[in-house]
Amino acid sequence: MKKISLVVLAVCSLLLVACKKPVEQQENFKVKFEVKYKPNHESNWVDVKEGTVITIEKPNSDNPSKPDEYVFDGKIFTDTEFMVVIDAVRDYQEGTSDSHCTDVCKDGNGQKTETITPEMSVTKDDGMLLQWHCTPKNAGNNIVSLTLYPKDEPKNKLTFKINFKK
């Protein structure tokens, strides 16, 4: 009877260890992603690091009949498909408007904060477009702080700022 109890205890212990290990590995797994941008829309991709401040000082078009629209031209890259969440915090001058493009382009909500949840995932082959368009009303700084993270990993984040300086 003692031998049977020891065998059952050993089997249960092995099952517990075997079942627990994948859970521990899963908890330590983080989606790897990066954001890159093209400083002048024609150059090579440049990495965006945590805490980076990117200043856009030139309108997208030289046409004087068009309003001065400034554009951050970026992309999210990954080696694992995931759903991204983008939290935006605006520090704009009054009258400044914006829009953002991921899976589709949408006007900003006109509020200080906005959470963007694209309906399609970031893919490892194509990545995902990340553009921010800003039309400043007056000269000066118009800053948006963006925090990106996988939908299921809010602590796995990248935060950077874009200053649309007219």
Image (cartoon, grey):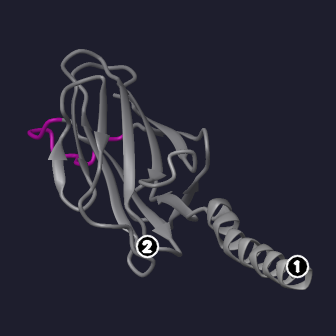
The amino acid type found where label 1 is placed reads: Leu
> Is 60 within the magenta?
yes
The amino acid type found where label 2 is placed reads: Glu
Chief secondary structure of the magenta span? loop
Residue that appears at 22% across and 48% down: 61
Q: Which mark is residue 6?
A: 1
Q: Over which residues does the magenta segment extend?
A: 58-67
The quarter in which the N terminus is drawn is bottom right
**Residue located farthest toward the left when viewing the structure as drawn:** 65
Crowdedness near tag 1: few (<14), some (14–19) or many (≥20) residues, C-alpha within 10 Å: few
> Is 126 within the magenta?
no
**Residue located farthest toward the front when viewing the structure as drawn:** 1
Q: Nearer the viewer, residue 102 or 44?
A: 102
Q: With 27 as the anchor, is 117 left or right in this view?
A: left
Give the structural element (helix, strand or loop) at label 2: loop
Q: Position of residue 15 (x, y in %)?
A: 72, 78
Q: With 102 as the anchor, is 155 left or right in this view?
A: right
Q: Is residue 142 above or below residue 154?
A: above
Query: Where is mark 2, residue-wise?
Result: 81
Give the structural element (helix, strand or loop) at label 1: helix
The quarter in which the C terminus is drawn is top left
Q: CA distance from mark 2 to mark 1?
A: 45 Å
* First along the sequence among labels 2 and 1: 1
Q: Position of residue 156 (x, y in %)?
A: 57, 50
Q: How many marks?
A: 2
Residue that appears at 38% across and 39% down: 87
Residue that appears at 60% across and 38% down: 51
- Are the residues flagged by discs 2 and 1 in contact, CB closer than 8 Å? no
Based on the displayed image, in which of its 4 quarters is residue 23 positioned? bottom right
Residue that appears at 46% across and 53% down: 39
Based on the displayed image, in which of its 4 quarters is residue 30 positioned? bottom right
